[in-house]
Image (tube, grey):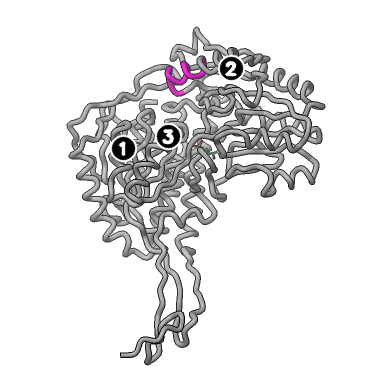
Amino acid sequence: MQDILTLLGITDTNKGTSTGAQWLASTGQTITSNSPVNGQHIANVVVTDAEGYEAVMQKAGEAFQEWRLWPSPKRGEVVRQVAEALRKYKEPLGKLVSYEMGKSLQEGYGEVQEMIDICDFAVGLSRQLHGLTMHSERPGHRMYEQWHPLGVVGIISAFNFPVAVWSWNAALAWVCGDVCVWKPSEKTPLCAIACQHIVAEVFAKNNVPEGVCNVVIGERDLGERIANDTRIPLVSATGSTRMGKAVGAAVGARLGRSLLELGGNNAIIISKDADLDMALIGCVFGAVGTAGQRCTTTRRLIIHEDVYDSFKNKLVAAYKQLRIGDPLDQNNHVGPLIDKGAVDQYLQSIEKCKKEGGQFVVEGGVLEGSGYESGCYVKPCIAEAQPNYEIVQHETFAPILYLMKYKTFEEAVAIQNGVPQGLSSSIMTLNLREAEQFLSSAGSDCGIANVNIGTSGAEIGGAFGGEKETGGGRESGSDAWRIYMRRQTNTINYTTSLPLAQGIKFDL
Ligand code: UN1
């Protein structure tokens, strides 16, 4: 790992405040990054202090004045080169993601692939930041709309996707002409430092002004600073609903924009008309992939009574096959949770579920002994539960799967929608009527609704995000770029008189 850290510009103690090529000295305390893989200390990072934050905001403001004037295809060309650099660094960066966050190596690489893909998407987008034209009600007038850069975008990202979610925001924001200030999770600061090195090299080669790509390191107070900063017109925040409510309230109080991507409580409906073998793969990967730490993780299965027992037995058998251990070893399916705090939450949720009457058909527990020294490895588990249990209504960021039974399709949809969150949802069925009803306005209330695939692993080309307590934000593909720009409506009069709209007469 040491050679990878060196290659990615990481030392024993890293400065955590950067405007691009420059790393600013801060006097703040340091935070420590430990690997959940083996519990070992990786490196320290100096926290951004108030002065460092001001220096970054100053630079970001200056950089925006210049960056907004670059033609967007030229900005796109720089982002194309960022994608090239990410291709070059895919292996070491993917390994660092796996080592610092604990997800499987394949998923670490997959995350870097998502970064490459969004950069490619953004390059094309840089020539397609289209506005509409309208017909004026007045003769000799033309109306159209333009999309202009917005300014400084604050990006607050979570530990579970320590690099991809930032890139979904940053790649789009950059082609839109914005500059970014990134506060990564304090649990995965080294991934951010590595990305900053990779991007800074590309930016410097292209004479991109210092301050287009900034990193600040800190905890909750730094997030609050960003949320309250009127110089930041858009704050994009990914994390818990609790965090999102605080960010949304602070940004809303100053009438800024926020893009919130918060908790999910994602369900798959297993119809009696499902291909159960295919459904099994989607459900197991959805529930245990990333050790249940995706916001799109499958947390609930709503199973038709006719196939309930047979599908439950298939699940139990599949869980017995799961190999839990070092995520860097490609033979393992499930790596560790992020830290011991997450392990505690997992244990508490299991207890709570039992207290409410849940029956575990696959028992949970913390693994001990050789290979599990970090204390962060837990067993994916399955409980039979009722939809109204408090714990079932709640997102626990761990591999706990709840099984529920249904009789009618309407009942299944009601259970699926009957939680505070609204991110991702799926139905497994070969019945066209059911599939279409699930996707209709009376079906799933989530931002993502799938048929015959699981709830996780969305592609970058679609808009990503969800409703209700998930926060309503959309990022990544489709037209998610619009939130990073300001819309301007323009009306031009090319006649020799000045007629007023709505037929109003005003003679002097
Ligand atoms: C997240 O967990 O915050 O759809 C993002 C997925 C990934 C992204 C998840 N592409 O599972």
Confirm if mark 3 falls within 8 A of ligand 1.
Answer: yes
**Which tag is nearer the camera, tag 3 or tag 1?**
1
Foreground pick, 198 / 436:
436
Pointer 1 residue? 224
Whether residue 55 is situated above or below residue 403 in the rendered picture: below
Q: CA distance from mark 3 to mark 1?
A: 15 Å
Residues shaded magenta = 338-347
Q: Residue at x 26, y 55 (%)?
A: 63
Q: Quadrant of the N terminus?
A: top left
Asked if residue 16 lies left or right of residue 340, the reply is left
Query: Looking at numbered disc 2 in the image, what kind of residue is underneath it?
Result: Cys
Q: Under tag 3, what secondary structure?
A: loop
Pointer 3 residue? 158
Most extreme residue toward the top is: 369
Residue 313: percent from left, percent from top: 75, 19
Q: CA distance from mark 1 to mark 2?
A: 33 Å
